[in-house]
Amino acid sequence: MGCATSSSTKTKESDNVLAAALVIQNWYRRYRAQLKTRERSALNIFQSIEYADEQSQLQLSNFFSFVLQHYKHIREKDRKLVNRLFGYTLYDRDRLDHRGLSEVAECYGGPQLQFPLTFTDIESLIEAYKEQRILHACYVLEILFQTKKVLKQMPNFNLVKTSPSKGVTICGDLHGKLNDLFLIFYKNGLPSASNAYIFNGDFVDRGNNSMEVLMILLVSFLVYPNDVHLNRGNHEDFLMNMRYGFTKEIMCKYKIHGKKILQILEEVYAWLPIGTIIDEEVLVIHGGISDDTDLNYLHCVNRNKMKSVLMPPIRMRGGYGTELKKRKGDTLLGVRTTSLSLSEDLAQNEWEQVIDILWSDPRRKKGCHPNTSRGGGCYFGPDVTAKVLSKCKLKLLIRSHECKPEGYEICHDGKVITVFSASNYYAEGSNRGAYIKLSHGTPPRFFQYQVTEATCSRPLYQRVNTIESSAIRILKERIISRKTDLINDFQLQDRKKSGKLSLGQWAFSMENVLGLNLPWRSLSSHLVTTDKDGNVDYMSCFSDIHIQKPVKEVQSALIETLYRYRSDLQIIFDVIDTDHSGLISMEEFHSMWKLFSSHYQVHIDDYQVNELAERMDLNKDGSIDFNEFLKAFYVVHKFDQLNKPDTKFA
């Protein structure tokens, strides 16, 4: 009987232990699920703002179209400005030469290359970059010229054959993440005749080592032109580079010869193939497709005309480019018209087809719809994928263009795969990178990785807090840049003038003004304070953040406008600043602002901008360092608790 009691007690203890274990397990699962939800929410903020910025970039192309379409009027007002505005892209690059470049000095400590390049040069370049050494400008220019020469012989779509014994590795966006490229090569091996690669666009921008990534890829391509395939992405575009950092990186690393590098780089971009077809079954393109995508048509497009996909064909009287063609070979405003219109002889349909290839994204919804997030390309549904693949007798579409938490994603009934190779893209620990290995007759194999930094070794909750705090911070900066517009919208709904709105009203105003397609209700706890009845004190949006004013007397509306359009103004400034000196005269800046404000319908008195610029000219030399000018309008988080590593958001 005693034994029975003992046995019963042990059974109860075991049951209690098991029950406790189940409680702990369920709690932990819920806790991890909550962390993952917060992580996805933060990534959604990053992505929404990224796409909104890209939309602004595409809209900026309308500014250049506006200037071209009104060039007669502008010529009368400011001939010099227009010459400078379009002079940046209008060189006869076939005549560009680097023979005037000084020879590599004996004291040069960077990598030494021998032309024609060999596998040894790939290895020596990688080793040098690991030691953070800079490749001489003479080598950079020679690589770019050689690359352009080889690319000109290639079709619009690379054709790749695989076998069970020889596959191909497909890498997505790298965005200047050199350590990710090193890790891919460490895990998968260097490019060779037996180890083929497809790099699917967006090699540059955002990361700090875009030049190093690009040089490694181009050298590998020159050594193995039949086994290293480079597809053009939407960031292989000189206007995108102005906004997202590659232009600045080049001018910083190559102060003397940076301008020449930028000039030939535009030509290299234009000659990059727009896609790769593997085994006549798999289409590899950077962005996506639309219901109008026609590969037969795209095979025949003169891709080198696309100097910048962001500058669409200009509709003149009598058709696209007609007015310019009439004076072909002549000069207009001091610039040769054979290259004035970046879309000369370029049909609207050609441009739209390439835009879709470089900018589109897949979605679950059937059909083809405008890509409202990015502002270019389209959203294509599973029915569009099935239709285009069937029409082209293909089985699979592999694309990149979108950051995915796991580095890749499969959708559209397995017919579309997204691969993204830049880990920690938005913030440390935000996402993994991945690449795909594909061989004939075998399913795709996925390989994931993440470059380990300090935050990646932290516990999950700390990593999520770090990502979340970064996301909320940039969201608050977007909010403060539209402060005046938001207040106006809030006050329209606040009929009682109480300073408060319902949560639904507040969320409506946020989306109405910012257009970021975010779950504002769930984000409200990070952004505003509410009373016991759940009403939102809408002015609390701005209580802990403001834009630093370089001049106290300047109106807040002007500050917000300059902050909101700072990237657009920077690009226009860089286009006008043809010598990349970083300086523009007061007169040039004033003329630039008049064009900008006229197109964007920004109603701010010119004298205010002029006065502000003059006050910013501290040394009174009559020119402005625009980088410093824009940096003066930085956002200050007065009560910023978001940087604390253990801050928890409900």
Image (cartoon, rainbow, N blue to C red):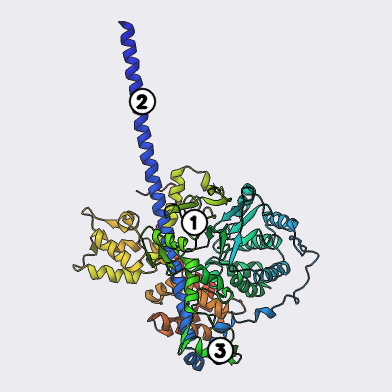
Q: Which disc number belongs to residue 18? A: 2
Residue 449 visible in the current orientation? no
Q: Residue 328 or 472: which is nearer the viewer?
A: 328
Q: Secondary structure at mark 2?
A: helix
Q: CA distance from mark 1 to mark 3?
A: 54 Å
Q: Residue at x 38, y 37 (%)?
A: 28
Side of 188 relative to 400 (left or right): right
Question: Label 3 belongs to which residue?
Answer: 80
The amino acid type, in three-letter code, at marker 3 is: Lys
Q: Residue 18 placed where, x, y %?
A: 36, 25
Most foreground residue, 472 or 68: 68
Q: Nearer the viewer, mark 2 or mark 1?
A: 1
Give 597 or 44, whichever is nearer the viewer: 44
Q: Nearer the viewer, mark 1 or mark 3?
A: 1
Q: Residue at x 20, y 54 (%)?
A: 533
Amino acid on which disc 2 is placed: Leu
Q: Secondary structure at mark 3?
A: helix
In the visual, does 111 lie left or right of 584? Answer: right
- The residues tagged by marks 2 and 1 sit, at their Cα atoms, a distance apart of 49 Å
Q: Which residue corresponds to mark 1?
A: 395
Q: Which one is earlier in the sequence, the residue at label 1 or at label 3?
A: 3
Q: Position of residue 596 (x, y in %)?
A: 45, 81
Residue 290 position, x and y percent, is: 43, 66
- Compute the Cα span from label 2 to label 3: 81 Å
* Label 1–label 3 contact, CB within 8 A: no
The disc, 2 or 1, on the residue closer to the chain's N-terminal end is 2
* Residue 253 occupies quadrant: bottom right
